[in-house]
Amino acid sequence: MSEEVGFISMAGAKAAGEAPVLGIGMLGYAFMGKAHSNAFKKLPYIMYPPVAIPRLVAICGRNQEAVAEAARRYGYEKTYTDWRKMIEDPDIQVFDNGGPNDSHAEPTIAAAQAGKHVFCEKPLARTAEEAKKMLDAVEKAGVKHQVAFNYRFVPAVVQARKLIESGALGRIYHWRAVYLQEWGMDPKMPISWRFQKHIAGSGALGDLGAHIIDLARFLVGEPTKVMGLTQNWMKERPSPGDPTKMVPSDVDDAFVAVFEFQGGALGTMEASRFAPGHKNYNSFEINAENGSIRFNLERLNELEVFWAKEEPKETRGFHTALISESFHPYWANWWPHGHMIGWEHSFVHEFHHFFDAIVNNKDVAPYGATFVDGYRNAVICDAILESAQSGRAVDIRY
């Protein structure tokens, strides 16, 4: 029991030989640049023995002063202000795109054409048309490719998938998901790229909705039809340089959608950046033949489970499973049971998965999201916007 819970096995793993080194070229140094770099630092000693050692070769951004500071902070060897020059660097084997959405397609396509394996933040692109070009490029280049749908790598979400794959839940009837945040409500918040359609592609839909759309496909399967609504409540925001000057904000602040899935399941999805009290509330519920499961990212070490025929019937109801045992996904690499992990650790898991695919020539799918998944996600987002504009249901066709 003591070894299973990890109190005396923390240093038990042993490496056989040296792991290969993968040179990283990182585009972007802000939110995702920080999250990805943090994962690269942790991966070699947490996912031990490591499948690869990430070498932080270069980081790229438009502002030389800011990117130089990021390189000092995160430990990158070189800096670039032109991604074209960075992807020519022979020390780089993996191109990691953590830039804004309008910087996803062109740099990622060029990196794939240069023979780099590519990892790209979500949403893969602003439109399905743009995503298809990216998919075609990586498939033609023959490189490994993954989209950063990191919630696939939260242990409780992986455990939910394993329950579904085992057949324990039986036929799925309902998918119900919401992703709610509050940070977009402040009318004094200066405009940023996330509120501008020409850069972001969409608002809450691409920022938050893309995550729950991916989880729906990951856990339930392919949606076939959608009816959607969107709303933009704050149509202008202050300019960053001059708060007295207002700039158009032309993306959705929220969306709701109803889905039909292959196999007959029905689904609802909703995302908003105008939900006071919710910081990062990514939650889903699945109702099925033999029971139900619920997950809430704000309590990400827990999975709520209900079994319809559980005995004794007098105490039948939802119960909370703490996903922190060594037999739960990824937990053997972390801490003794009950010693919690968090949001940042999903990035460690997803990069471990990607590097394993590169080094050992494994498929990124089905547990990792490939550019196929990124493209299909973009098709669904476009269908929701089309439905909201037309006021009718839209068939989802890839």
Image (cartoon, rainbow, N blue to C red):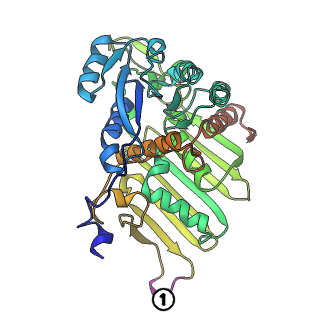
- How many callouts does the rendering have? 1
Q: Is residue 316 magenta?
A: no
State the residue at coordinates (53%, 52%): 177
State the residue at coordinates (72%, 32%): 390
Q: Nearer the viewer, residue 175 or 10?
A: 10
In the picture, which quadrant includes the C terminus? top right
Q: Nearer the viewer, residue 13 or 4?
A: 13
- Residue 238 picture location, percent across and down: 37, 17
Q: Nearer the viewer, residue 45 or 261?
A: 45
**Going by the image, does 17 lie left or right of 224?**
left
**Going by the image, does 313 lie left or right of 164?**
left
Q: Hey, which residue is sitting farthest front in the picture?
A: 17
Residue 186 visible in the displayed image: no
Kind of residue indicated by mark 1? Pro
State the residue at coordinates (47%, 53%): 283
Q: Which residues are magenta?
A: 310-315
Q: Is residue 313 magenta?
A: yes
Up/down of 175 relative to 364, above or below: below
Q: Nearer the viewer, residue 354 or 51?
A: 51
Instruction: Say few, some or many: other residues with alpha carbon within 10 Å of mark 1 (under 14 / 14 to 19 / 20 or more).
Output: few
Q: Quadrant of residue 76?
A: top left
In the picture, which quadrant includes the N terminus? bottom left
- Residue 150 picture location, percent across and down: 46, 44
The secondary structure type at the circle numbered 1 is loop
State the residue at coordinates (70%, 52%): 260
Up/down of 79 relative to 366, above or below: above
Residue holding disc 1: 312
Residue 384 visible in the displayed image: yes
**Going by the image, does 382 lie left or right of 78?**
right
- Residue 351 picture location, percent across and down: 43, 41
